[in-house]
Image: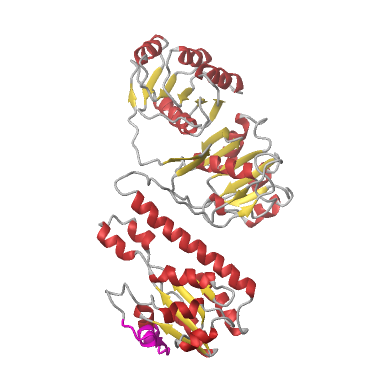
Amino acid sequence: MKWALLSVWDKTGIVDLAKVLIEHDYRILSSGGTGAALDKAGIPFTDVSAYTGSPEMMDGRVKTLHPKIHGGILGRRGIDDALMQEHGIEPIDLVVVNLYPFEAMSSKGLPIDKVIEYIDIGGPAMVRAAAKNHRYVAVVVDPADYDKVAEAIRRGGFTAEERLNLAAKAFARTAAYDGAISNYFTGIGRPFPTILTLQHRGGRTLRYGENPHQAAAVYGEAGIAGEEPLQGRQMSYNNYLDVHAAVGLLREFNDGCAAVIVKHNNPCGVAIGNGLLETYIAAREVDPVSAYGSIVAVNKEVTEDVAREITKTFVEVLIAPSYTTGALEIMKAKENMRVLRLPDPVIHDEIRSIDGGILVQRTEPYRENWRVVSEREPTAHEMLAMELAWKVCKHTKSNAIVFADEKAVIGIGAGQMNRVESAEIAVRKARKSLAGSAVASDAFLPFPDTLEVAAAAGATALVQPGGSIRDQEVIDAANRLNVAMVFTGVRHFRH
């Protein structure tokens, strides 16, 4: 006769698992809410208090913290048998525990005296004990594993490898749980905790890192990190970075069709429109040379006509919300092209490594305050063009200067050490006239020179954050050149 201990907060699937255990001659130990669920389902079990001879006490704070429980979990078969028999300790072969929902409850803004009641003590202790003794004991912390557990029970037990894998998952769970508690307590009264503990799951080794001589892995089970290609080669380190950049910009556009083309983390083509085919072509034609070997992100379903057009160019990755069956069939001709589905966004802090530590950045909801500072008001056309240029500028490496009309970007100058050179590059890269275009700058203009370059190229409107000590000089230059200028009040440096 084998023993299983069941003690779970999340009761999903526990009754069905218990039925399998009973069918295969397991005796069940349980208590509290789990015991009540089993009792309601008519499943026989032994109450923990009856087994230990000690009552549950302190409003449930002390239930399973007893030598007959932990001795049964930690006992080494063939070594501790006599001692266990002497003290009436039954060997426990399976421990099924999931923990109080501290992570969820601590984010609800409850007072600390309420939050601490969701810190599980007995659960992590049993999980760690079972994981330590995985040579003899299987430990289960995730209801998603119950089907695999039931299968193992039906075939007569767990393999050593299965117990080891379950133990690794259990230790990861208690580490994440303790990390969440530490983050909460060291973050009380602060925007960020003084000690930050992070855990990312789903690690996969990549072929190499940014370059072939560098090793790399990706971690994550949701968002872009969790996506695997529908077709094509394995995603690379650089692919993930570029897709992240492309999708971040794509999500700026909520209405109509949008196409974003990214190369080396910078947009090289962006367009909006009513039909996806024409929109994609417009984005590609902004800079067709840079579009070679790029990442393409679109916000509408890819149909056969769009798939045919995309496959005319070498594209590293295509990401879209969905694809028609015919489109997927067409794209098979480009067997190395990675095709991804656009996932739902995952909101979290940005984390970057530096020598000796990390930087953490959080973007809270904010509101820009667009105000016209020039004598001339922008036209409706110029406002639409500035809005498009500004959205793209936010996602371009600093110093960033972006020219656009109301439907597409015309020229992009990215990543230069001074703003004037970014403007000159954007002008030089433009493949059509900049007459009547709008221009965006990710940060304020410290001098009128960038404005003068833009105006000489044909731009008639400019949007920038403002905030320079020489703002008035720049405003005077805009008035002199008859350029409509808008300040947003928000800077968008990107490093």
Q: Residue drawn at (64%, 71%), measured in percent from left and top?
A: 161
The quarter of the picture where residue 425 lies is top right
Question: Is 60 placed above or below 114 here?
Answer: below
Colouring convention used in this rendered image of the protein: secondary structure
Horizontal side of 114 relative to 168 (left or right) equals left
Residue 15 versus residue 368: which sits nearer the camera? 15
Residue 90 versus residue 101: which sits nearer the camera? 90
Residue 144 versus residue 490: which sits nearer the camera? 144
Q: Give the range drawn in magenta.
A: 38-55
Question: Is 102 placed above or below 446 here?
Answer: below
Q: Position of residue 56 (x, y in %)?
A: 31, 79
Can residue 113 be seen from the camera position used here? yes
**Is residue 251 rendered magenta in the image?**
no
Can residue 303 be seen from the camera position used here? no
Q: Where is residue 350 in the image (x, y as percent from the top left)?
A: 46, 43
Horizontal side of 77 relative to 236 (left or right) equals left
Q: Position of residue 468 (x, y in %)?
A: 37, 18
Question: Is 392 placed above or below 431 here?
Answer: below
The quarter of the picture where residue 237 lies is top right
